[in-house]
Amino acid sequence: MIEAVLSDAGQKQLDSSNNGVKSWMQDLRDLAYDLEDVLDAFATQAQIYELMMIKEDVHGRVLKNNDPNFASSPNNNMVQSIVVSGSKAVEHLSFMFNSGQDLTAKIEEINQQLKEILSQTKGLGLSVHVMQQQVIPPRAEREWKSWQESTSLLCEPFVYGREGDRKETISRLLNDENSMTGNNYVVIPIVGIGGIGKTTLAQLIYNDEEVEVFSLKAWVYVSQVFDAKRITTSIINSITGESNTFCDLDQAQVQLKKVLTGRRFLIVLDDIWSEKYSDWDRLRTPLRAGAKGSRVVATTRSQKVARIMNPQLNSMILLEGLSDDDVGV
């Protein structure tokens, strides 16, 4: 129902100067931000719980929280870092709540606000009807999604507290490490909770003079919807500066293979959510055509995603929360 209304609202917003529809869309965007904050808090707690209940030692043996070696597990420090960095999300969330209001009440409040927003559709002349996905106006869909899309450009002139992470990532990009699977490229996952700075670090790397050794570079925002054809097309367009379109995934992948063949590339895939191995397996096929030393930098909140893309031990760049000293407080 919401998707159907959004389609009509997006079309009306683009085709007219209807301020009421624009205001309605903004209210829905604001509510989406509130919901994302709640989900971030859940994700943080889930990561902490998972790491505290079961960890692995340096030999890959599973340790439980009553094991004498548990405290010395390499992941133990990571738990502490997630607690610290997650405090930002929790702190922000606390401002959303009134005294005595719990998370359940906040979710109920969001649900009620959503009902109120949907109740305004008739007064704005918005149609609610069942539609096939292909008839959603592409322009309206792009307008709705563009507000959260990342780019390769740095938003801030100075970035504090990430110099160590920058150097570590650059080192992995430029060293002679090759994939154990025999591929000419290596995936470097940047992992951390929402808002901790994964995209900012990727932007720093992408714009660093040291990565000019890569003859081809591409930046692609992935998001929750993993569409292999769209991602493949975006890689091609980012490299060539063109606006290609393809009828199907096969056409796109054949063209990407031609573009990458024999060239050393750096591709950034920002904000990956899909935890399906089949999604990554389908996307990566043309990447094998690149020259040795090619790299894929992937940002994600999920360690499962990171392990799917690169199962090698210690392959992840795990971002920790910034201290007061890091930000100059």
Image (spheres, helix red, strand yellow):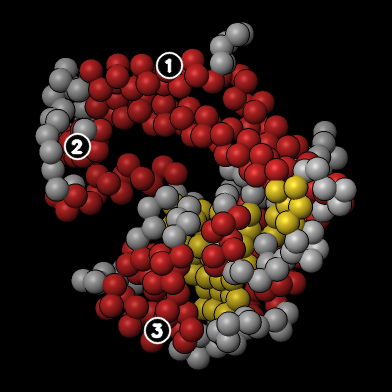
Residue flagged by tag 1: what amino acid is it?
Glu
Q: Residue 297 carries which label?
A: none
Query: For the residues marked 3 and 1, what is the alpha-carbon distance in whole angstroms?
Result: 49 Å
The single residue placed furthest to the bottom in the displayed view is 262
Q: Quadrant of the N terminus?
A: top left
Q: Tag 2 or tag 3, which sits nearer the N-term?
A: 2
Which of label 2 and label 1 is nearer to you? Answer: 1
Q: Nearer the viewer, residue 192 or 208?
A: 192
- Residue at numbered disc 3: 257
SS at badge 2: helix
Q: Nearer the viewer, residue 63 or 12?
A: 63
Residue flagged by tag 2: what amino acid is it?
Ala
Q: Which of 226 and 43 is in front in this view?
A: 43
Q: Residues within 10 Å of mark 2 (few under 14, many from 20)?
A: some
- In percent of width and height, residue 108 lies at 42, 17
- Residue at numbered disc 2: 4
- In percent of width and height, residue 105 lies at 49, 15
Q: Which mark is residue 109?
A: 1
Q: 226 left or right of 140?
A: right
- Residue placed at 75% from the left, 47% from the top? 64
Q: Tag 1 or tag 3, which sits nearer the N-term?
A: 1
Q: Residues within 10 Å of mark 1 (few under 14, many from 20)?
A: few
Do the residues bearing badges 3 and 2 touch, measured as CB atoms within 8 Å? no
**Residue 193 visible to an observer of this rendering:** yes
SS at badge 1: helix
Q: 180 left or right of 152?
A: right
Do the residues bearing badges 3 and 1 touch, measured as CB atoms within 8 Å? no
Query: For the residues marked 2 and 1, what is the alpha-carbon distance in whole angstroms?
Result: 23 Å
Which of label 3 and label 1 is nearer to you? Answer: 1
Q: In this view, does 263 lie above or below 204?
A: below
Q: 101 left or right of 107?
A: right
- In percent of width and height, residue 260 lies at 45, 83
